[in-house]
Amino acid sequence: MPFACANLDRPPTCRLTSLSCRNDALRAAVLQSLRDCMSVSEVVDLASGLPDAWQADILRGWRPDLRTLPPRTRAEFVARVLSRMETPETPQMQRDIARLIARLHAMTHAASGQRTVIPDPLLH
């Protein structure tokens, strides 16, 4: 089932059709795909440096006992995100995911002043 719009002002039938819905769904899918391959302490560290809406996305449906292996490549991570969203891979989606990862890295790296918890293959 595709992600429904996270914006409660929109009807629940909104299915990645508007740009706002797609951006909300993409952000949630990226954050949750990252979360699923992190330790509990890494997730807590990452979430603590995020805005409230992003914290809600990363923590929604979290099951720490279902941790997966970190992605070995950016392509593997993109595949995980798109699978979560049930959407096909396009060059635009690849660029949007890369931009979101870069933004997330900048936000968390600037906030902590430390090494980011985002897996290295996603940053290159």
Image (tube, rainbow, N blue to C red):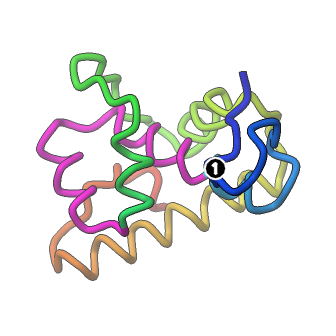
Q: Main secondary structure of the magenta part?
A: helix
Look at the image and tell me in which quarter the N terminus lies.
top right
**Residue at x 56%, y 42% (from the top left corner):** 29
Residue 83: x and y, percent? 66, 27
**Residue at x 82%, y 34% (from the top left corner):** 88
- Is residue 69 one of those drawn in magenta? no
The image quadrant of residue 120 is: bottom left
Q: Give above or below for 92 relative to 40.
A: below
Residues shaded magenta: 27-51
**Residue at x 85%, y 56% (from the top left corner):** 18
Residue 3: x and y, percent? 68, 35
Structural crowding at the residue carrying mark 1, measured as other residues with C-alpha within 10 Å and reported as few (<14), some (14–19) or many (≥20): many
Q: Which residue is mark 1?
A: 26
Q: Amino acid at mark 1?
A: Leu
SS at circle 1:
helix
Q: Nearer the viewer, residue 16 or 109?
A: 16
**Residue at x 27%, y 56% (from the top left corner):** 47
